[in-house]
Amino acid sequence: MKLEKLDPNELINWVQLAKTQTHRGRVCDRIPQLALANPDWFAVHICCQSGQSYSTGDMACVFPLMSLIKPFSLLYLLEHFGAEQLLQWVGVEPSDAPFNSLEQLIADGGRPRNPMINSGAITLADKLPGKTATERTQSFCQWLNKLAGCHIQLDEVMLTSVRASRSPSNQAIANYLGEKRYITNINSSLDTYEQICCLSGEVKDLALLGKLLTWEYERIQLQHRQMVNGVMLTCGLYEASPLFAVKIGLPMKSGIGGGLLAIVPGEGAIACYSPTLDSVGNPVAAIALVEALSRNLGLSIFG
């Protein structure tokens, strides 16, 4: 197991090197509450299959998962409805357009390109079991906490901030999805999507969630875990996904809240928090650290 051979002192050194990259990004300021994050914050937690774990940095920082919730809403719906049904709702094709592109959705005739971009995630939010957005979010959150042993919860302050600065592009995407009948209720779909994006926790919670995608779980079908990892590898870092699939070689997902999750299948999960983002919306220093780990430990799934 390559990940378990990590030297804690080397990890600290690689973190320090990664943090020198923070100046290349900026904290997301589209949502006022996100803009309050300190650009110097950094945390990493690594869970290994043996039970060994490594962590360093600002471990007490709590941040919203934002788009990091997307792989898990995909997993949740796969477990509830199966792959055949899910593929009727969304595709699994990579996109070279930004994650909130209405133009891409229109070009595709209203069918979301994949579950990792906003059109796909809003569509899947519409399908979560439950009568209301709040009921859907609570059931989903409880399922994740019970299965992963983590302690994520809805950040009401963040949700208020998100609602007060609702993305016009997300509204336009939801309107078009409704027009093309990919979602049944525009307002409820958007409300659900915003709520699940505001599920929040520490970097350790993110790593525990990542374990669900790392090795066999009795309550998760192998096919579903493989499908989520495949979509993360090809779509999880938006239009930068092909580049990092080659450079790092791990299924990964980012969020504009500053979180990053990397899966080392069969070995462990790497979770990072660093709020400065590049122009695509990926956390700069966190990606630099995962790249260093993959290169130095030989973690790429491509051997």
Image (tube, helix red, strand yellow):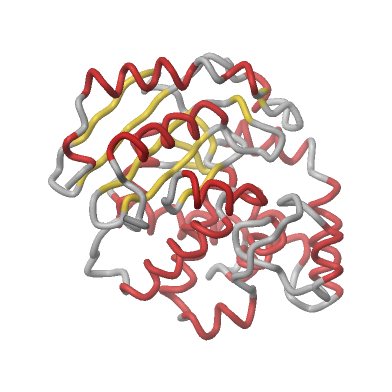
Looking at the image, residue 85 sits to the left or right of residue 302; the answer is right
Q: Looking at the picture, does residue 234 appear above or below residue 110? A: above
Residue in view at x 85 percent, y 47 percent: 168
Residue in view at x 36 percent, y 50 percent: 300
Where is the C terminus found, in terms of image quarters? bottom left
Residue 247 position in % (x across, y down): 49, 44
Q: Please name whichever residue, 285 or 188, is drawn nearer the observer in this view of the structure.
A: 285
Q: Please name whichever residue, 110 or 193, is drawn nearer the observer in this view of the structure.
A: 110
- Asked which quadrant contains residue 222, the reply is bottom left
Looking at the image, residue 150 sits to the left or right of residue 179; the answer is left
Number of numbered discs present?
A: 0
Residue in view at x 50 percent, y 34 percent: 287
Q: Looking at the picture, does residue 297 appear above or below residue 169? A: above
Looking at the image, residue 237 sits to the left or right of residue 173; the answer is left
Residue 93 position in % (x across, y down): 63, 69
Residue 289 position in % (x across, y down): 42, 30
* Residue found at the very far left of the displayed protein: 50
Q: Looking at the picture, does residue 92 appear above or below residue 88? A: above
Q: Looking at the picture, does residue 76 appear above or below residue 116? A: below
Residue in view at x 52 percent, y 51 percent: 69
